[in-house]
Image (cartoon, helix red, strand yellow):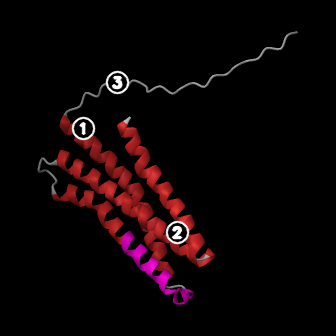
Amino acid sequence: MVARTVRITPIEPRPMPQPPRYETPEQRADRNLVELLQELRVAQTGVQILFAFLLGVAFTSRFPQLSAFQRGIYAATLLLTVITAAVLATPVALHRGLFHRGAKPRIVALSARYAEVGLMFLALAINGAVLLLLDVVFGHIAAIALTAATTAMFACLWFVVPWYLRRS
């Protein structure tokens, strides 16, 4: 019996051809807005959890023992979280404020920009919380180094990869 070597070559993913969408510009705007608002619901939940955590931190018995550096991180992170909540909720306010005014494509375009800015603030707020916690646990140098790594991760996953894929 002769042993055979089986060579497996990786299969390169090919983009699946998408059937054309037969939708009017208004239908496309409706669909895009629904998809965007669903994405924002997911992000807003994370913001609410982070905000609740930060509010709870201020009322712990250990909070008075935080250094001035740690209190500064806390305050900056809390404010970044508030800004994030406001920016990510703006598309809902735009939709409500311009409802039935024939401005849906404009609402979608503006809301997409607000979502991008909101994600940037969310990444900063999350990394602020990471910095605060790691500083308490490990000290300044380790906290800064690890937070730089998580910040780079967010930048790559949320901004660089989508930018790269848009260009290719």
Spot occupied by residue 16 in the image (x, y as percentages of width and height): 43, 25
Q: Which residues are magenta?
A: 61-81
| Amino acid type assigned to the residue bearing label 3 in the image | Pro
Please say whether residue 155 is one of the residues in the magenta stretch. no
Spot occupied by residue 76 in the image (x, y as percentages of width and height): 40, 76
**108 lies above or below 126:** above
Q: Could you tell which of marks 1 and 3 lies nearer the N-terminus?
A: 3
Q: CA distance from mark 3 to mark 2?
A: 44 Å
Q: Nearer the viewer, residue 16 or 65?
A: 65
Q: Could you tell which of marks 3 and 2 lies nearer the N-terminus?
A: 3
Please tell me the numbered disc located at residue 130. Answer: 2
Q: Nearer the viewer, residue 61 or 23?
A: 61
Q: Is residue 115 left or right of residue 123?
A: left
Q: Secondary structure at mark 2?
A: helix
Q: Could you tell which of marks 1 and 2 lies nearer the N-terminus?
A: 1
Residue denoted by label 3: 19
Q: CA distance from mark 1 to mark 3?
A: 15 Å
| Amino acid type assigned to the residue bearing label 2 in the image | Val
| Amino acid type assigned to the residue bearing label 1 in the image | Arg
Please say whether residue 78 is one of the residues in the magenta stretch. yes
Quadrant where the N terminus lies?
top right
Residue denoted by label 1: 28
Spot occupied by residue 8 in the image (x, y as percentages of width and height): 67, 22
Outermost top residue: 1
Outermost left residue: 101
Which residue occupies 19% across, 39% down? 26
Can the viewer see residue 49 in this picture?
no
Secondary structure mostly seen in the magenta stretch = helix
Which dot, 3 or 2, sits closer to the camera?
A: 2
